[in-house]
Amino acid sequence: MALLDIRALSVDLPAPGGAIHALRRVDLTVTRGTIHGLIGESGCGKTMTAMALLGLLPRGADIGAERFLFDGMALRDVASSLRGRRIALISQDPAAALNPVLTIRRQIDDVLRAHHDLPRVARDARAVELLAATGLPDPARVLRSYPHQLSGGMQQRVVIAQALATGADLLIADEPTTALDVTIGAQVLALLRRLVQERGLTILMITHDMDVVAEVCDSATVLYAGTSVEDGPMSEVLTRPRHPYTRALLAALPDAGPPGTRLAAIEGRIPPPFEAIAGCAFAPRCAAAQAECRLRPPPERQDGQHRWTCLVERGTDDQAAA
Amino acid sequence: MTKPLLEVRDLVVRYGSRGLFRGQPRPAVSGVSLSLAPGQTLGVVGESGSGKSSLLRAILRLVPSESGKVVLDGQDWLALSPRELRRARQDIGVVAQNPFLSLSPRMTIAEILAEPLLARQGLARRGLQDRAAELLSRCGLPADFLPRRARELSGGQAQRVAIARALALDPKLLVLDEPTSALDISVQAQILNFLSDLKAESGLSMLFVTHNLKVVAHISDHLVVMRNGEVLEQGTTAELMSAPRHDYTHRLFGFGMRARQTAV
């Protein structure tokens, strides 16, 4: 059974003059012990999906779903009680996630005290062990430090240690390396991969960076305008994209062609979140779109484990049915 | 070889240390040399602490240089008096990373574009509106943007306005500091294409500073890789991409290639 099993998740936020469709229709399945990428540009609903999983949606949010399950439990009811116990968040900016006036010892200890009934000495030993597990040299010295005395990469390792201290089995990593240098980010990603292998953790990796997806993810879901448009094994999605949006996004990367050649920019812009969309959300910007694409929701297509929603691009599995 | 437009020789930048008995700190830029030929794009790539921003600030004379030489279009740049500098700075256009921070939220796009034109003087006030509209259209934006403010624009549109402002005084050199780092991938592609067009049409010379090697490799003729205040290696983009001499450069290029390798 998948750890996360989400089907047709929608989130509407109340606003003056009508609802904002923060999420329109998101399907998301995450298998235990894997790193699953959630890919998209600004405003596509990546972070809103994470907030829904953590039970942190703004007051008055209207959640709809055919299935919205974590480990078989209905997330709509239990999300806020699972937060910090079974689901933990690693945010983009570790300096903002840590309290600047408290030592690392205090900040990890707070988490351990909240979740485990252990004496002080045992908690200290556990803190050292957790910091060591994140590859920090000299954990005892790190414990005595304040956040500003650590580099960005070290701070992010401390945040990861905090997440491990909760004992959570799902980590939501929201752009965990965006604030870090490329070489430091690569080390943090390698650490996350090792933790998945050694501890059987599951990670939902939220990112706009295809290089990050390529480095660590086993599988990925592509979001566009609050809608999941493509989903499958990482190498399938990145090297044989089937949805026109995923194709366009990959073609727009600066290393998609030889240096100096024109990049394939995507014309137009994302539909505003208050707009109702009858057909495919990407149709107005899609080169392959037909008149029908704008009229009704695109059908689901499948090729083995690779799934996407598109009227035009068919899968081999769909050929017989068509 | 043609005379370089910008030449930097053995430039050293060192920030002062606080405290009487503290030793001198390590220089932020230690002995950097590079040169940019007219009509070319030079990419400077490095991570935080590499000295790329200090180098940029020293070239713009926003921080003093300890030693070394900067020659821009034949002028000894570091020797200019404040008064001469004020005039000479008009030869450099600057585009910063985040357009929403670099464009005043209180001014209209028309006012933003008029400001550098007014600073130069000699241009009739009534010509300003036309010139601003002309700058916008050169940057692919319609003239009806003029009365709007930056917040009403998307990130890509705002960055085009920032580029239009940098081009207002027909600079010889355009300095771009992480111009696409705050933008989405699809918008980044639009801006990179636009910069390529500018270069092709008007032979603009560009100094492009970024931490993103893939972005800079796409647009630059030459690359300079910096680390710890020094130039680790430099050469043509093709040379560096096909045969990076340093493991560090190799790692920067190699990041994210796992999927593409396994897929073949």
Image (cartoon, grey):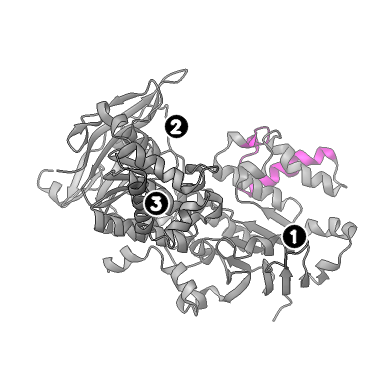
Q: Give the residue at mark 3.
A: A249
Q: Which residues are magenta?
A: B125-150
Q: Mark 2 to mark 1: distance in Å?
A: 40 Å
Q: Secondary structure at mark 3?
A: helix
Residue B147 lies in quadrant = top right
Same-subunit check for callouts 3 and 2:
yes
Instruction: Give residue A196's position: percent from left, percent from top.
Output: 27, 55
Q: Give the residue at mark 1.
A: B60
> Is residue B136 covered in magenta?
yes
Quarter of the image that includes the C terminus of chain A: top left
What secondary structure is the magenta-colored segment mainly? helix
Residue at image position (72%, 40%) is: B112
Question: Count of labels shown?
Answer: 3
Task: Identify the mark at residue A272; answer none if there is no mark.
Answer: 2
Q: Which is nearer the eye, A321 or A45?
A: A45
Residue at image position (68%, 65%) is: B55
Q: Which is nearer the eye, A224 or B58?
A: B58
Q: Which chain letter goes with mark 1?
A: B
- Relative horizontal placement of residue B224, taking residue A224 as reference (left or right): right
Which comes before the other along the chain, label 3 or label 2? 3
- Circle 1: residue type: Leu
